[in-house]
Image: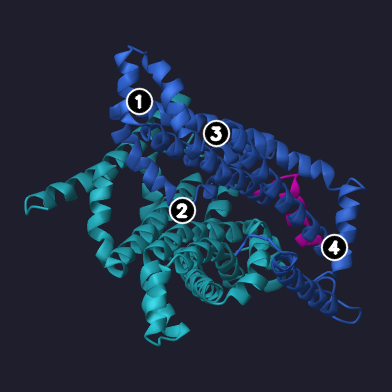
Amino acid sequence: MMEPRHALDVVKAVVPPLATGVVIVAVWAWATRPGGLDAFVLPSPMAVLRALYQGWIGGTLLPHALATGKAALGGLVIGALAGLASGALIVLIRPLEYLMMPLVTALQSVPKIALAPLIISYFGFGLESKVFTVALLCFFPLFVAAATGMRAVDPRLLDMYRAFSASPLHILLHARLPAAAPYVFGALQIAVVLALIGCVVSEFVASTEGLGFIIKSGSGELDIAGMFAAILSLSAMGVAAGLLVKEAQRRIVFWS
Amino acid sequence: MTAGGMPRRLAARIAGPLAALGLTAAAWMALKWLGGFQDTVLPGPGQAVAALADGLTSGAYWPHIGSTLGAVAIGYAVGALIALGVAALLAVSATAERFLMVPIIAFQSIPKIALGPLLFIWVGYGMGASVTLVVLACFYPIFVNAFIALRGVDPNLIDLYRACGAGRLRILLAVRFPTAASQIMTGLEVAVVFALLAAVVMEFVSATSGLGFLIQNATTTLDTPTAFAAIILLALSGVLASSLVRGARRIVVFWETERRDTHMEGA
């Protein structure tokens, strides 16, 4: 059904969603026409485009997007590495697993984001709080992925490595890590979204810069078009980061 | 499954979390002792539990618990109904899928949590905004799991029903939903976490009550034991809500429990 063999199939695939989009924008433009909904309630599509243009070409949003991106990336790297290392550790040292696993499964259903205000009271308004919050959020999916993935390795392969008297470290790097790679990338895909969310929530709670700060302060100043622009930029960053992870997966885990 | 196996399995299931709890408390105390933290920075687990007991017996926490869990429950129920309805519509009608699938995926790319301050302007203070954000946050995980599962039904089975004269609705209710039930429950499990997260974030942004509000308020007044008590309550709510949904799964998809148990033991 999804093979666009004929031009007609392409039209069938492209036109309907486009039509929906046009209808949504048309209704939106109509509702926000002069004399329609107040711009404090819903800005017109043009006003949002203007705010986006202002923000990215005029450069008002750019430093905030960079601040959010920097904190999200920093936290993601720290949290992901810590998660991977801990996951590898409990695979290597069996008893640790019995201690850690119940704790981790319990923590999975706990909203870790609730710690954001406390983290800010420890580390202040700046980059450190955001990085810490993001790292905390990103730790868990990678920990679970590393632990499950490294155990999903073919036992016969492990036997072979052992038969050739490979060291545990050698087995970890050459047999377990490649086996875990697809799991790890799946978790990274989730972690990328969590990183942006964690960053934004931290900025909601208290901050002086970042897209979350713009969204929050926009609600105070009733700059709704600015809020829309910031939310759209955030979404675009999330999509771009997700595509980057997918591309990296395609190149690194080329065999799956 | 022998008669003697049940209590032992139950004991194993309880012992793990208990050990984890003890370990957490021990690590917590060690951290406080090693770091030499003051009580306003990091209270001991005893102080947090004392604050918790105090708040519960004096009744100070109950309204907060009520408004958070209320928003979660209502938003989750509404979000699940909408998501299941949309998923059923798109699974049954190829036309609806063509028109709506791409916009839904585009909407999914917006981090819902970021809409908090916007909802505050549109809906205002109070539970309404929390419920709305919970609905938005729950929608996609439930929708996507339900849609994939409702679509992935064995076409031969559908053909059989069709050959016997069953209509679309009959096929949806008698074939698609039962076959998809397991994966739908998976989506519902994932969404619980998102629901709680959304409620807490909305309370950070604007609320005047709720556990998220309690955490933020206690942190700014340096009443750290209360903040930790509220976090413990949130953690308990999260575990409780998740196990409720998992329990519901065992009832709804009763024919799968056997397999799941063996699977969990094998893991």
- What amino acid type should be assigned to the residue bearing mark 2? Ala
Q: Nearer the viewer, mark 4 or mark 1?
A: 1
Q: From the viewer's perspective, is A109 left or right of A10?
A: left
- What amino acid type should be assigned to the residue bearing mark 4? Val
Percent of width and height locating residue B150? 46, 69
* Numbered label attached to residue B230: 2
Near mark 4 (Cα within 10 A), the count class, few <14, some 14-19 or many ≥20, is: many
Same chain, labels 3 and 1: yes
Highlighted range, magenta? A205-222
Whether residue A161 is visible: yes
Q: Chain of mark 4?
A: A
* Residue at (82, 76) in percent of width and height: A26
Near mark 3 (Cα within 10 A), the count class, few <14, some 14-19 or many ≥20, is: some
Callout 3 secondary element: loop
Q: How is the image coloured?
A: by chain
Q: From the viewer's perspective, is B229 left or right of A253?
A: left
Q: Which residue is mark 4?
A: A48
Q: Chain of mark 3?
A: A
Callout 4 secondary element: helix
Same chain, labels 3 and 4: yes
Residue A129's quadrant in the figure? top right
